[in-house]
Image (cartoon, rainbow, N blue to C red):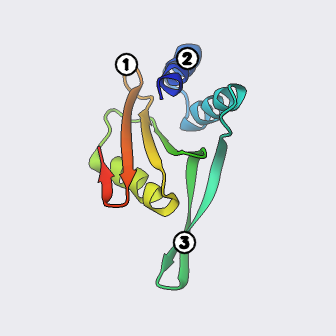
Amino acid sequence: MNRIHELIEDVYAQLGAGRREKAYQVALAYALNNIGITASIEVSNPVYYYDVHVATAFIDILTATHVIEIKYVRKLTDIHRQQCQAYMRDKGRNGILINFGSQSPEVENLLYTNDGINE
């Protein structure tokens, strides 16, 4: 996990503040792939109501072990955490919620367990 945090810091150091979320997303996925962590961007995540497909959400970055959700906001809120947690439940993976909109990247690690999600 520390290596991922180092990459997040490096992406911010290289791109600086004020970019669109997409720039941070692509740069972080590139950096992850570059160190051997397979990372896919904009991964389709179908949403079902019972057996009816009602929507498709897109996960910012998906690795074999993590859902990574990227934001560019003043401060992360419960709404951002809930979105990441929904993806975590769907994929059965831990989560990393990142905010590139503050003075330095704000990173929250979210742990997925069969009993629920722990912050």
> Which tag, 3 or 1, sits closer to the chain's start?
3
Residue at screen point 41% across, 29% down: 101
Kind of residue indicated by mark 1: Gln
Kind of residue indicated by mark 3: Ala
Q: Is residue 28 left or right of residue 34?
A: left
Kind of residue indicated by mark 2: Asp
Few, some or many residues within 10 Å of mark 1 (<14, 14–19, 20+): few
Task: Report the Cα–Cα distance between label 2 and label 1.
Answer: 14 Å
Q: Is residue 45 above or below residue 59?
A: below
- In percent of width and height, residue 67 lies at 51, 47
Closest to the observer: 86 or 3?
A: 3
Task: Report the Cα–Cα distance between label 3 and label 2.
Answer: 34 Å
Closest to the observer: 35 or 115?
A: 115
Q: Is residue 62 above or below residue 1?
A: below
Residue behind mark 1: 103
Tell me, for residue 10, which label it has, or none.
2
Is label 3 in contact with label 1 (beta carbons under 8 Å)? Answer: no
Q: Is residue 2 left or right of residue 35?
A: left
Q: Is residue 61 above or below residue 105?
A: below
Residue at screen point 48% across, 29% down: 1
Residue at screen point 51% across, 77% down: 48
Residue behind mark 3: 55
- In percent of width and height, residue 9 lies at 49, 19
> Which tag, 2 or 1, sits closer to the chain's start?
2
> Which tag, 3 or 2, sits closer to the chain's start?
2
